[in-house]
Amino acid sequence: MVEDALKVLLDKQPTWFFQVSSVVLIIILGILGFWAFLGSKRFAQGMGKENQLIELLKEQNDLKTQVNTHQSISAQLSTVIENSRSFIDSLNMYRRVDKADRHIAEHFVQTIIEGLSSDVKSVVGEKHRCGLWIQRDDNGSTLNLVHGSAGFPESYINNRTLDINNSIAGRSFRKKESIFNKEDVTLDSDWTPTTSSGSYNALICVPVGNFGVITVDAKQPMHENALLIAELYASICEGFFIEFTDQFVYDAQQQAAVSEE
């Protein structure tokens, strides 16, 4: 009934009514479309701002990470400078002592090795071990572990050796150059697995003059600063060994003079 009545009503309307209604409908649709466009535009702008906010937060987190890293490195280098000054003071003290006891100097060297294993850490919780290997045998074919940090078993000291011609440390000693395998030492052609090397993935080798090599083993990739610190401490160790040599030469000269008298 309602549909029939509506149909009769529309049939009685003049032509201009439909024309006006069409225009009004088009205007309404246009307004609705415009508001839909504005809504979508505002939504897109809101999403853009949200994405920008996400990017800003990401950049902020990255900057915080960088700041923390730089602060850790700064603290590390401050410790290295302080310890290096102490080691150099010990070296100067050793030089001032007449006929200094070799065991005192060896104690200083052990302190340097232990300090190095701690000072190369750029992140709290990292695991390192450091060793000083000296060429001692007559034919010069091996390096002997004479000083080691806590990472080495006590039984290794003076009993552990490395082949000069078939080891990474030996290559460093022969060529008198530092070697830095900062992530995967197993890729080095001179690497040889041992019972204690399985969990150590990174390695630094630094020659100590003509005396031997300092090694730094790490379980995580090492920062570039670790190499610089190892080279600094190796130079200080070399100073102690030079004093050993000078002292031995002095003692021999004194003994020779006494014999001639």
Image (cartoon, grey):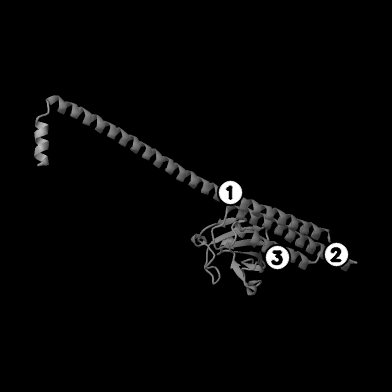
Residue 74 appears left or right of 249:
left
Residue 162 or 152: which is nearer the viewer? 152
Q: Which tag, 1 or 3, sits closer to the chain's start?
A: 1
Q: Is residue 45 above or below residue 101?
A: above
Quadrant (top left, top right, bottom left, bottom right) of the N terminus: top left
Look at label 1 and name its amino acid: Val
Residue 11 appears left or right of 211:
left
| In this view, the mark in front (1 or 3) | 1
Q: Which residue is mark 2?
A: 254
The kind of secondary structure element at disc 1 is helix
Q: Is residue 62 above or below residue 32?
A: below
- Mark 2: few, some, or many residues within 10 Å (few <14, many ≥20)? few
Q: Is residue 86 above or below residue 138?
A: above
**Numbered circle sitting on residue 45:** none
In the rendered image, the residue lying farthest to the right is: 261
Q: Which residue is mark 3?
A: 110
Residues tagged 2 and 3 counted as in contact (Cβ below 8 A): no
Look at label 2 and name its amino acid: Gln
The count of marks equals: 3
Q: Quadrant of residue 215?
A: bottom right
Q: Which tag, 2 or 3, sits closer to the chain's start?
A: 3
Quadrant (top left, top right, bottom left, bottom right) of the C terminus: bottom right
Look at label 3 and name its amino acid: Gln
- Mark 3: few, some, or many residues within 10 Å (few <14, many ≥20)? some
Residue 36 or 210: which is nearer the viewer? 36
What residue is drawn where x is 16% and y is 27%? 17
Q: Which residue is mark 1?
A: 67
Q: Which tag, 2 or 1, sits closer to the chain's start?
A: 1
The kind of secondary structure element at disc 3 is helix
**Cα distance, mark 1 to mark 3?**
34 Å
